[in-house]
Image (cartoon, rainbow, N blue to C red):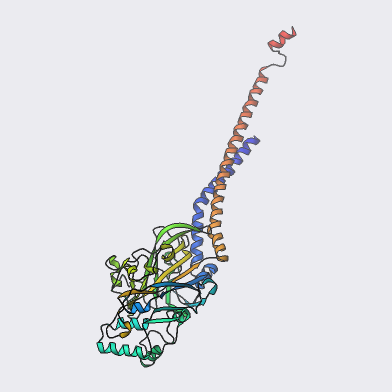
Protein backbone atom coordinates (compact mmCIF):
# COMPACT_ATOMS: atom_id res chain seq x y z
CA UNK A 1 0.00 0.00 0.00
CA UNK A 2 2.83 2.32 0.88
CA UNK A 3 4.51 1.63 -2.47
CA UNK A 4 1.28 2.35 -4.31
CA UNK A 5 1.03 5.72 -2.61
CA UNK A 6 4.69 6.35 -3.39
CA UNK A 7 4.14 5.44 -7.04
CA UNK A 8 1.10 7.69 -7.29
CA UNK A 9 3.04 10.55 -5.71
CA UNK A 10 5.95 10.12 -8.10
CA UNK A 11 3.57 9.93 -11.05
CA UNK A 12 1.75 13.13 -10.04
CA UNK A 13 5.01 15.01 -9.44
CA UNK A 14 6.48 13.76 -12.73
CA UNK A 15 3.36 14.70 -14.68
CA UNK A 16 3.36 18.20 -13.19
CA UNK A 17 7.05 18.64 -14.06
CA UNK A 18 6.49 17.53 -17.65
CA UNK A 19 3.49 19.83 -18.01
CA UNK A 20 5.45 22.74 -16.50
CA UNK A 21 8.39 22.08 -18.85
CA UNK A 22 6.10 21.95 -21.90
CA UNK A 23 4.32 25.14 -20.81
CA UNK A 24 7.69 26.82 -20.26
CA UNK A 25 8.72 25.69 -23.74
CA UNK A 26 5.89 27.72 -25.27
CA UNK A 27 5.61 30.52 -22.70
CA UNK A 28 9.37 31.18 -22.43
CA UNK A 29 9.77 32.80 -25.89
CA UNK A 30 6.66 34.91 -25.21
CA UNK A 31 8.18 36.14 -21.94
CA UNK A 32 11.46 37.00 -23.68
CA UNK A 33 9.56 38.72 -26.52
CA UNK A 34 7.56 40.83 -24.06
CA UNK A 35 10.68 41.75 -22.07
CA UNK A 36 12.51 42.87 -25.21
CA UNK A 37 9.55 45.00 -26.30
CA UNK A 38 9.24 46.49 -22.84
CA UNK A 39 12.95 47.26 -22.44
CA UNK A 40 13.84 48.72 -25.86
CA UNK A 41 11.05 51.28 -26.20
CA UNK A 42 12.66 54.75 -26.27
CA UNK A 43 11.86 55.76 -22.70
CA UNK A 44 14.13 57.23 -19.98
CA UNK A 45 12.80 54.50 -17.67
CA UNK A 46 14.62 51.89 -19.78
CA UNK A 47 18.03 52.83 -18.46
CA UNK A 48 20.31 50.59 -20.52
CA UNK A 49 18.55 50.87 -23.89
CA UNK A 50 17.88 54.59 -23.44
CA UNK A 51 21.54 55.29 -22.63
CA UNK A 52 22.61 53.19 -25.61
CA UNK A 53 20.29 55.27 -27.82
CA UNK A 54 20.94 58.70 -26.30
CA UNK A 55 24.70 58.77 -25.70
CA UNK A 56 25.88 55.71 -27.68
CA UNK A 57 28.48 54.80 -25.01
CA UNK A 58 30.41 52.41 -27.28
CA UNK A 59 33.72 52.95 -29.11
CA UNK A 60 33.10 54.84 -32.36
CA UNK A 61 35.82 55.79 -34.84
CA UNK A 62 36.27 57.55 -38.13
CA UNK A 63 39.26 56.48 -40.21
CA UNK A 64 40.25 58.73 -43.12
CA UNK A 65 42.47 57.74 -46.06
CA UNK A 66 43.75 60.32 -48.56
CA UNK A 67 44.57 59.65 -52.20
CA UNK A 68 47.87 61.47 -52.56
CA UNK A 69 48.46 62.49 -56.21
CA UNK A 70 51.97 61.49 -57.25
CA UNK A 71 52.02 63.20 -60.68
CA UNK A 72 50.07 66.50 -60.51
CA UNK A 73 52.10 68.11 -63.33
CA UNK A 74 51.37 65.19 -65.69
CA UNK A 75 47.68 65.29 -64.74
CA UNK A 76 47.52 69.00 -65.61
CA UNK A 77 49.03 68.14 -68.99
CA UNK A 78 46.39 65.49 -69.67
CA UNK A 79 48.10 62.46 -68.19
CA UNK A 80 46.43 59.70 -66.20
CA UNK A 81 46.41 60.40 -62.42
CA UNK A 82 48.55 58.15 -60.26
CA UNK A 83 47.66 57.98 -56.56
CA UNK A 84 48.91 56.35 -53.38
CA UNK A 85 46.74 55.80 -50.34
CA UNK A 86 47.90 57.66 -47.22
CA UNK A 87 46.54 56.77 -43.81
CA UNK A 88 44.40 55.81 -42.10
CA UNK A 89 44.18 58.85 -39.87
CA UNK A 90 41.91 57.71 -37.05
CA UNK A 91 39.57 59.89 -35.01
CA UNK A 92 37.53 58.86 -32.01
CA UNK A 93 33.95 59.94 -32.59
CA UNK A 94 31.75 61.15 -29.78
CA UNK A 95 28.04 61.56 -30.46
CA UNK A 96 25.32 62.73 -28.10
CA UNK A 97 21.66 63.51 -28.58
CA UNK A 98 20.45 66.85 -27.25
CA UNK A 99 17.20 68.83 -27.27
CA UNK A 100 15.33 65.56 -26.77
CA UNK A 101 11.58 66.22 -26.93
CA UNK A 102 8.86 63.58 -26.61
CA UNK A 103 5.58 64.14 -28.48
CA UNK A 104 2.01 62.90 -27.77
CA UNK A 105 1.97 60.81 -30.98
CA UNK A 106 4.71 58.50 -29.60
CA UNK A 107 7.56 60.15 -31.46
CA UNK A 108 10.66 61.90 -30.14
CA UNK A 109 12.74 64.69 -31.70
CA UNK A 110 16.44 65.32 -31.12
CA UNK A 111 19.59 66.90 -32.46
CA UNK A 112 22.61 64.61 -32.56
CA UNK A 113 25.94 66.38 -32.14
CA UNK A 114 29.25 64.84 -33.16
CA UNK A 115 32.83 65.60 -32.18
CA UNK A 116 36.10 64.08 -33.37
CA UNK A 117 39.38 63.55 -31.50
CA UNK A 118 42.57 62.46 -33.25
CA UNK A 119 44.01 59.11 -32.10
CA UNK A 120 47.75 59.07 -32.98
CA UNK A 121 48.28 55.55 -31.58
CA UNK A 122 45.69 54.09 -33.98
CA UNK A 123 46.78 56.11 -37.01
CA UNK A 124 49.36 55.46 -39.70
CA UNK A 125 50.91 58.91 -39.74
CA UNK A 126 50.16 62.27 -38.13
CA UNK A 127 47.94 65.22 -38.96
CA UNK A 128 51.12 67.06 -39.94
CA UNK A 129 51.62 64.71 -42.92
CA UNK A 130 51.49 66.58 -46.24
CA UNK A 131 49.42 65.26 -49.16
CA UNK A 132 48.35 66.54 -52.57
CA UNK A 133 44.70 66.39 -53.65
CA UNK A 134 42.52 68.28 -56.18
CA UNK A 135 41.51 71.80 -55.21
CA UNK A 136 37.73 71.57 -55.02
CA UNK A 137 37.37 75.36 -54.98
CA UNK A 138 39.05 75.63 -58.38
CA UNK A 139 38.31 72.42 -60.26
CA UNK A 140 34.79 72.12 -58.86
CA UNK A 141 33.95 75.74 -59.70
CA UNK A 142 35.37 75.31 -63.22
CA UNK A 143 32.97 72.44 -64.00
CA UNK A 144 30.06 74.35 -62.45
CA UNK A 145 30.79 77.33 -64.73
CA UNK A 146 31.42 75.34 -67.89
CA UNK A 147 28.20 76.59 -69.54
CA UNK A 148 28.54 80.19 -68.45
CA UNK A 149 29.68 82.91 -70.86
CA UNK A 150 33.34 82.78 -71.82
CA UNK A 151 33.93 86.23 -70.32
CA UNK A 152 32.65 85.04 -66.95
CA UNK A 153 35.00 82.06 -67.03
CA UNK A 154 37.93 84.37 -67.82
CA UNK A 155 36.98 86.57 -64.88
CA UNK A 156 36.77 83.57 -62.57
CA UNK A 157 40.18 82.38 -63.74
CA UNK A 158 41.62 85.84 -63.08
CA UNK A 159 40.17 85.70 -59.56
CA UNK A 160 41.87 82.37 -58.95
CA UNK A 161 45.18 83.84 -60.08
CA UNK A 162 44.75 86.88 -57.87
CA UNK A 163 44.35 84.71 -54.78
CA UNK A 164 46.99 82.20 -55.96
CA UNK A 165 44.57 79.29 -56.09
CA UNK A 166 45.88 76.44 -58.26
CA UNK A 167 44.31 73.18 -59.45
CA UNK A 168 45.89 71.11 -56.68
CA UNK A 169 46.37 71.55 -52.94
CA UNK A 170 49.47 70.41 -51.10
CA UNK A 171 48.71 70.78 -47.41
CA UNK A 172 48.79 68.93 -44.12
CA UNK A 173 46.17 66.34 -43.28
CA UNK A 174 44.95 68.47 -40.38
CA UNK A 175 44.42 71.49 -42.63
CA UNK A 176 42.60 69.50 -45.29
CA UNK A 177 40.43 67.82 -42.67
CA UNK A 178 39.43 70.69 -40.41
CA UNK A 179 40.15 73.79 -42.44
CA UNK A 180 42.85 76.14 -43.66
CA UNK A 181 42.87 79.86 -44.24
CA UNK A 182 41.82 80.75 -47.80
CA UNK A 183 41.84 84.37 -48.90
CA UNK A 184 39.52 83.43 -51.76
CA UNK A 185 36.95 82.05 -49.30
CA UNK A 186 37.27 85.15 -47.14
CA UNK A 187 36.77 87.37 -50.21
CA UNK A 188 33.68 85.47 -51.40
CA UNK A 189 32.08 85.38 -47.94
CA UNK A 190 32.68 89.11 -47.53
CA UNK A 191 31.43 90.35 -50.91
CA UNK A 192 29.05 87.53 -51.86
CA UNK A 193 27.55 86.33 -48.56
CA UNK A 194 25.64 83.08 -48.86
CA UNK A 195 27.41 82.06 -52.08
CA UNK A 196 29.40 79.36 -50.26
CA UNK A 197 27.79 76.76 -48.00
CA UNK A 198 30.34 77.44 -45.25
CA UNK A 199 32.03 80.30 -43.45
CA UNK A 200 35.48 80.52 -41.93
CA UNK A 201 38.26 78.13 -42.87
CA UNK A 202 37.70 75.65 -45.69
CA UNK A 203 38.19 71.92 -44.99
CA UNK A 204 36.60 68.67 -46.10
CA UNK A 205 35.21 67.93 -42.61
CA UNK A 206 35.18 71.46 -41.21
CA UNK A 207 31.38 71.46 -41.09
CA UNK A 208 31.24 68.05 -39.38
CA UNK A 209 33.04 68.75 -36.12
CA UNK A 210 30.92 70.15 -33.28
CA UNK A 211 27.87 70.05 -35.54
CA UNK A 212 24.60 68.15 -35.68
CA UNK A 213 23.05 65.99 -38.39
CA UNK A 214 19.74 67.86 -38.47
CA UNK A 215 16.52 67.60 -36.48
CA UNK A 216 15.37 63.96 -36.48
CA UNK A 217 11.92 62.90 -35.32
CA UNK A 218 11.63 59.13 -34.83
CA UNK A 219 9.06 56.71 -33.46
CA UNK A 220 9.56 55.56 -29.85
CA UNK A 221 7.96 52.15 -30.46
CA UNK A 222 5.45 52.66 -27.65
CA UNK A 223 2.45 52.46 -29.97
CA UNK A 224 3.91 49.83 -32.31
CA UNK A 225 7.27 48.16 -31.72
CA UNK A 226 7.61 47.59 -35.47
CA UNK A 227 7.99 51.36 -35.91
CA UNK A 228 10.68 51.92 -33.27
CA UNK A 229 13.61 54.12 -34.43
CA UNK A 230 11.95 54.73 -37.81
CA UNK A 231 12.23 58.31 -39.05
CA UNK A 232 8.99 60.27 -39.02
CA UNK A 233 10.62 63.47 -40.33
CA UNK A 234 14.00 65.14 -40.79
CA UNK A 235 14.28 68.91 -40.39
CA UNK A 236 10.50 68.93 -40.53
CA UNK A 237 10.42 67.11 -43.88
CA UNK A 238 8.66 63.80 -44.44
CA UNK A 239 10.24 63.58 -47.90
CA UNK A 240 13.18 65.14 -49.73
CA UNK A 241 13.25 67.54 -52.66
CA UNK A 242 16.76 66.84 -54.02
CA UNK A 243 15.89 64.07 -56.44
CA UNK A 244 13.79 63.59 -59.55
CA UNK A 245 11.30 60.91 -58.49
CA UNK A 246 9.03 60.46 -55.44
CA UNK A 247 10.65 57.09 -54.71
CA UNK A 248 14.15 58.57 -54.53
CA UNK A 249 12.89 61.43 -52.34
CA UNK A 250 11.45 59.06 -49.73
CA UNK A 251 12.90 59.12 -46.22
CA UNK A 252 12.97 55.43 -45.37
CA UNK A 253 13.98 53.39 -42.36
CA UNK A 254 15.74 54.52 -39.22
CA UNK A 255 18.43 57.11 -38.51
CA UNK A 256 21.06 54.40 -39.05
CA UNK A 257 21.93 53.44 -35.47
CA UNK A 258 19.31 50.86 -34.43
CA UNK A 259 16.49 48.93 -36.07
CA UNK A 260 13.20 47.30 -34.98
CA UNK A 261 13.59 43.92 -33.22
CA UNK A 262 12.71 40.39 -34.30
CA UNK A 263 14.45 40.51 -37.66
CA UNK A 264 14.46 37.64 -40.12
CA UNK A 265 16.78 36.78 -43.00
CA UNK A 266 14.26 38.44 -45.29
CA UNK A 267 14.53 41.72 -43.36
CA UNK A 268 16.55 44.61 -44.79
CA UNK A 269 18.25 47.58 -43.12
CA UNK A 270 16.83 50.81 -44.55
CA UNK A 271 18.14 54.08 -43.11
CA UNK A 272 18.34 57.76 -43.98
CA UNK A 273 21.79 59.36 -44.28
CA UNK A 274 21.94 63.19 -44.23
CA UNK A 275 25.55 63.04 -45.45
CA UNK A 276 24.54 61.00 -48.52
CA UNK A 277 21.37 63.13 -48.91
CA UNK A 278 19.24 60.02 -49.43
CA UNK A 279 17.92 56.79 -47.96
CA UNK A 280 20.07 53.68 -48.26
CA UNK A 281 19.29 50.00 -47.70
CA UNK A 282 21.46 47.03 -46.78
CA UNK A 283 20.59 43.39 -47.43
CA UNK A 284 21.18 40.15 -45.52
CA UNK A 285 24.37 38.27 -46.35
CA UNK A 286 25.01 35.59 -43.72
CA UNK A 287 24.77 34.50 -40.08
CA UNK A 288 27.61 34.90 -37.62
CA UNK A 289 28.63 35.03 -33.94
CA UNK A 290 30.38 37.78 -31.97
CA UNK A 291 31.49 37.03 -28.39
CA UNK A 292 28.92 34.25 -28.23
CA UNK A 293 26.10 36.49 -29.49
CA UNK A 294 24.31 35.44 -32.71
CA UNK A 295 24.20 38.04 -35.48
CA UNK A 296 23.09 38.70 -39.03
CA UNK A 297 25.54 40.42 -41.36
CA UNK A 298 24.09 42.99 -43.77
CA UNK A 299 25.96 44.46 -46.73
CA UNK A 300 25.36 46.95 -49.54
CA UNK A 301 23.66 45.50 -52.64
CA UNK A 302 25.44 46.03 -55.94
CA UNK A 303 22.51 48.19 -56.99
CA UNK A 304 23.06 50.75 -54.22
CA UNK A 305 25.03 53.18 -56.41
CA UNK A 306 24.11 51.70 -59.79
CA UNK A 307 23.10 54.21 -62.46
CA UNK A 308 19.62 54.42 -63.96
CA UNK A 309 20.56 52.32 -66.98
CA UNK A 310 21.67 49.36 -64.87
CA UNK A 311 18.97 49.75 -62.19
CA UNK A 312 15.82 51.64 -63.21
CA UNK A 313 14.72 52.76 -59.69
CA UNK A 314 17.94 54.79 -59.42
CA UNK A 315 17.02 56.91 -62.44
CA UNK A 316 15.76 59.54 -60.03
CA UNK A 317 19.30 60.07 -58.67
CA UNK A 318 20.60 61.06 -62.11
CA UNK A 319 22.20 62.75 -64.02
CA UNK A 320 24.36 59.67 -63.66
CA UNK A 321 27.75 58.60 -64.80
CA UNK A 322 29.09 55.05 -64.58
CA UNK A 323 27.49 52.58 -62.20
CA UNK A 324 28.98 52.76 -58.73
CA UNK A 325 28.75 56.55 -58.47
CA UNK A 326 26.10 58.57 -56.65
CA UNK A 327 25.82 62.13 -57.92
CA UNK A 328 25.31 64.31 -54.81
CA UNK A 329 25.67 67.65 -56.60
CA UNK A 330 21.95 68.38 -56.17
CA UNK A 331 22.36 68.59 -52.39
CA UNK A 332 25.90 70.00 -52.37
CA UNK A 333 25.24 73.35 -54.09
CA UNK A 334 25.72 71.76 -57.54
CA UNK A 335 29.36 70.98 -56.87
CA UNK A 336 30.44 68.02 -59.09
CA UNK A 337 30.82 65.59 -56.19
CA UNK A 338 30.18 61.85 -56.26
CA UNK A 339 30.00 59.19 -53.57
CA UNK A 340 31.14 55.61 -54.17
CA UNK A 341 32.54 52.63 -52.35
CA UNK A 342 36.30 52.95 -51.63
CA UNK A 343 38.61 52.27 -54.57
CA UNK A 344 35.47 52.06 -56.75
CA UNK A 345 34.58 48.67 -55.27
CA UNK A 346 31.39 47.29 -56.89
CA UNK A 347 31.61 50.02 -59.56
CA UNK A 348 31.99 49.95 -63.32
CA UNK A 349 35.55 48.62 -63.98
CA UNK A 350 36.15 51.44 -66.46
CA UNK A 351 36.56 53.82 -63.50
CA UNK A 352 39.69 51.93 -62.49
CA UNK A 353 41.19 52.54 -65.94
CA UNK A 354 41.12 56.30 -65.45
CA UNK A 355 43.18 56.33 -62.23
CA UNK A 356 46.33 54.35 -61.39
CA UNK A 357 46.85 52.95 -57.88
CA UNK A 358 43.39 51.66 -56.99
CA UNK A 359 42.92 48.07 -55.80
CA UNK A 360 39.36 47.31 -54.59
CA UNK A 361 38.64 44.28 -52.38
CA UNK A 362 35.53 43.31 -50.43
CA UNK A 363 37.37 42.83 -47.12
CA UNK A 364 38.98 46.26 -47.14
CA UNK A 365 36.43 48.33 -49.04
CA UNK A 366 33.01 46.71 -48.65
CA UNK A 367 30.70 48.02 -45.94
CA UNK A 368 28.77 45.88 -43.45
CA UNK A 369 26.61 45.92 -40.33
CA UNK A 370 26.42 43.04 -37.86
CA UNK A 371 22.99 43.12 -36.18
CA UNK A 372 21.59 41.14 -33.27
CA UNK A 373 18.36 40.03 -34.99
CA UNK A 374 16.29 39.63 -31.83
CA UNK A 375 16.78 43.25 -30.70
CA UNK A 376 17.86 45.10 -33.87
CA UNK A 377 20.96 46.43 -32.07
CA UNK A 378 24.20 46.70 -34.12
CA UNK A 379 27.08 44.73 -32.62
CA UNK A 380 29.79 45.66 -35.13
CA UNK A 381 29.57 48.26 -37.89
CA UNK A 382 31.85 49.43 -40.68
CA UNK A 383 30.45 52.00 -43.12
CA UNK A 384 32.97 52.86 -45.85
CA UNK A 385 32.44 55.56 -48.46
CA UNK A 386 34.60 57.50 -50.89
CA UNK A 387 34.34 61.15 -51.93
CA UNK A 388 35.18 61.88 -55.56
CA UNK A 389 35.46 65.06 -57.62
CA UNK A 390 34.51 65.13 -61.28
CA UNK A 391 37.13 67.27 -63.02
CA UNK A 392 38.02 68.20 -66.59
CA UNK A 393 39.60 70.92 -68.69
CA UNK A 394 37.29 73.95 -69.06
CA UNK A 395 38.07 76.55 -71.68
CA UNK A 396 38.63 80.01 -70.26
CA UNK A 397 39.71 78.64 -66.88
CA UNK A 398 43.45 78.33 -67.34
CA UNK A 399 43.90 76.56 -64.01
CA UNK A 400 42.31 73.42 -65.48
CA UNK A 401 45.06 73.11 -68.13
CA UNK A 402 44.52 69.98 -70.24
CA UNK A 403 43.13 67.82 -67.44
CA UNK A 404 41.39 64.77 -68.89
CA UNK A 405 37.80 64.10 -67.93
CA UNK A 406 37.94 61.90 -64.83
CA UNK A 407 36.08 61.11 -61.62
CA UNK A 408 38.96 61.68 -59.23
CA UNK A 409 39.03 59.97 -55.81
CA UNK A 410 40.09 62.35 -53.04
CA UNK A 411 39.48 60.53 -49.75
CA UNK A 412 37.70 57.50 -48.42
CA UNK A 413 36.57 57.17 -44.85
CA UNK A 414 35.25 54.47 -42.58
CA UNK A 415 32.84 55.03 -39.70
CA UNK A 416 33.04 52.05 -37.36
CA UNK A 417 31.84 51.01 -33.95
CA UNK A 418 31.32 47.90 -31.86
CA UNK A 419 29.73 46.93 -28.55
CA UNK A 420 32.36 46.20 -25.91
CA UNK A 421 33.03 46.11 -22.18
CA UNK A 422 30.22 46.25 -19.62
CA UNK A 423 27.52 46.77 -22.23
CA UNK A 424 28.63 43.66 -24.12
CA UNK A 425 28.61 41.65 -20.88
CA UNK A 426 25.12 42.87 -19.95
CA UNK A 427 23.91 42.26 -23.49
CA UNK A 428 25.31 38.72 -23.48
CA UNK A 429 23.84 37.93 -20.05
CA UNK A 430 20.33 39.22 -20.74
CA UNK A 431 19.94 38.10 -24.33
CA UNK A 432 22.04 34.97 -24.59
CA UNK A 433 22.70 33.42 -21.16
CA UNK A 434 19.24 33.90 -19.60
CA UNK A 435 17.30 32.55 -22.63
CA UNK A 436 19.74 29.62 -22.74
CA UNK A 437 19.23 28.93 -19.02
CA UNK A 438 15.46 29.09 -19.55
CA UNK A 439 15.76 26.61 -22.40
CA UNK A 440 17.88 24.23 -20.29
CA UNK A 441 15.46 24.54 -17.36
CA UNK A 442 12.48 23.57 -19.49
CA UNK A 443 14.27 20.48 -20.78
CA UNK A 444 15.41 19.61 -17.23
CA UNK A 445 11.81 19.76 -16.01
CA UNK A 446 10.62 17.56 -18.89
CA UNK A 447 13.51 15.10 -18.37
CA UNK A 448 13.08 14.88 -14.58
CA UNK A 449 9.32 14.60 -15.01
CA UNK A 450 9.64 11.68 -17.43
CA UNK A 451 12.15 10.03 -15.09
CA UNK A 452 9.74 10.43 -12.17
CA UNK A 453 6.88 8.92 -14.19
CA UNK A 454 9.12 5.98 -15.19
CA UNK A 455 10.16 5.51 -11.56
CA UNK A 456 6.52 5.60 -10.50
CA UNK A 457 5.67 2.88 -12.99
CA UNK A 458 8.59 0.74 -11.79
CA UNK A 459 7.63 1.20 -8.15
CA UNK A 460 4.01 0.39 -8.93
CA UNK A 461 4.95 -2.65 -10.98
CA UNK A 462 7.34 -4.01 -8.36
CA UNK A 463 4.74 -3.45 -5.67
CA UNK A 464 2.11 -5.29 -7.70
CA UNK A 465 4.44 -8.28 -8.21
CA UNK A 466 5.19 -8.44 -4.50
CA UNK A 467 1.52 -8.30 -3.66
CA UNK A 468 0.79 -11.13 -6.09
CA UNK A 469 3.60 -13.24 -4.59
CA UNK A 470 2.30 -12.65 -1.09
CA UNK A 471 -1.21 -13.63 -2.19
CA UNK A 472 0.04 -16.95 -3.64
CA UNK A 473 1.89 -17.83 -0.46
CA UNK A 474 -1.14 -17.01 1.65
CA UNK A 475 -3.40 -19.20 -0.49
CA UNK A 476 -0.94 -22.11 -0.18
CA UNK A 477 -0.80 -21.84 3.60
CA UNK A 478 -4.58 -21.80 3.84
CA UNK A 479 -4.90 -25.02 1.70
CA UNK A 480 -3.02 -27.14 4.34
CA UNK A 481 -5.06 -28.00 7.46
CA UNK A 482 -3.38 -27.68 10.87
CA UNK A 483 -3.37 -31.48 11.54
CA UNK A 484 -2.61 -32.63 8.06
CA UNK A 485 0.82 -33.64 6.71
CA UNK A 486 1.96 -33.83 3.19
CA UNK A 487 2.37 -37.25 1.59
CA UNK A 488 6.12 -36.86 1.62
CA UNK A 489 6.10 -36.14 5.28
CA UNK A 490 3.82 -39.11 5.93
CA UNK A 491 6.15 -41.47 4.11
CA UNK A 492 9.06 -40.15 6.01
CA UNK A 493 7.26 -40.70 9.28
CA UNK A 494 6.46 -44.23 8.39
Quarter of the image for residue 299 reads bottom left
Q: What residue occupies the far top of the structure in this picture?
A: 494
Vertical arrangement, residue 135 with respect to residue 419, above or below: below
Does residue 252 appear in this view? Answer: no
Q: Residue at x 45, y 85 (%)?
A: 180
Left of 439 or right of it: where is 66?
left
Q: Where residue 418 sits: x, y (%)?
A: 50, 66
Where residue 170 appears, x then y in whole percent? 42, 81
Q: Quadrant of the C terminus?
A: top right
In percent of width and height, residue 81 lies at 36, 74
Work out which residue is located at the far bottom of the displayed protein and give it. 191
Residue 13, x across and y down, in percent: 59, 44
In this picture, residue 64 sits left or right of residue 150: right
Instruction: State the residue in front, 50 or 129.
Output: 129
- Number of numbered callouts drawn: 0
User: From where the camera sits, is residue 307 visible?
Assistant: yes
Residue at the limit of the structure toward the right, as seen here? 493
Q: Quadrant of residue 11?
A: top right
Tell which of 465 and 319 is nearer to you: 319
Q: Name the foreground residue: 369 vs 460.
A: 369
Q: Is residue 432 above or below residue 20?
A: below
Quadrant where the image shows the N terminus: top right
Q: Nearer the viewer, residue 346 or 195?
A: 346
Amino acid sequence: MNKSKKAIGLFVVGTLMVVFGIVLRFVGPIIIHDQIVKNIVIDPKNEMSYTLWKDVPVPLFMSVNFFNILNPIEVLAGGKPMVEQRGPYVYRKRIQKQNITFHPNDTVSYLEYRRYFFEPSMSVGNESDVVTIPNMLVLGAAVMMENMPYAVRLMVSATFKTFKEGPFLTKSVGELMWGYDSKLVDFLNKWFPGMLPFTGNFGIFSEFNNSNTGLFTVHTGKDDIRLIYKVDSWNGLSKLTNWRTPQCNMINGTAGQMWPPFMTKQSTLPFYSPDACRSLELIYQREGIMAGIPLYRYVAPKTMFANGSDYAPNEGFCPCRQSGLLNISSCKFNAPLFISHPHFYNADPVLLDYVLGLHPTEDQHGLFMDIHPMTGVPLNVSIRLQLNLYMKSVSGVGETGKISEVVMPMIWFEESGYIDGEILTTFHTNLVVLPMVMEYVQYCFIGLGLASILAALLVYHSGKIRCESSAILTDTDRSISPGEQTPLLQDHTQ
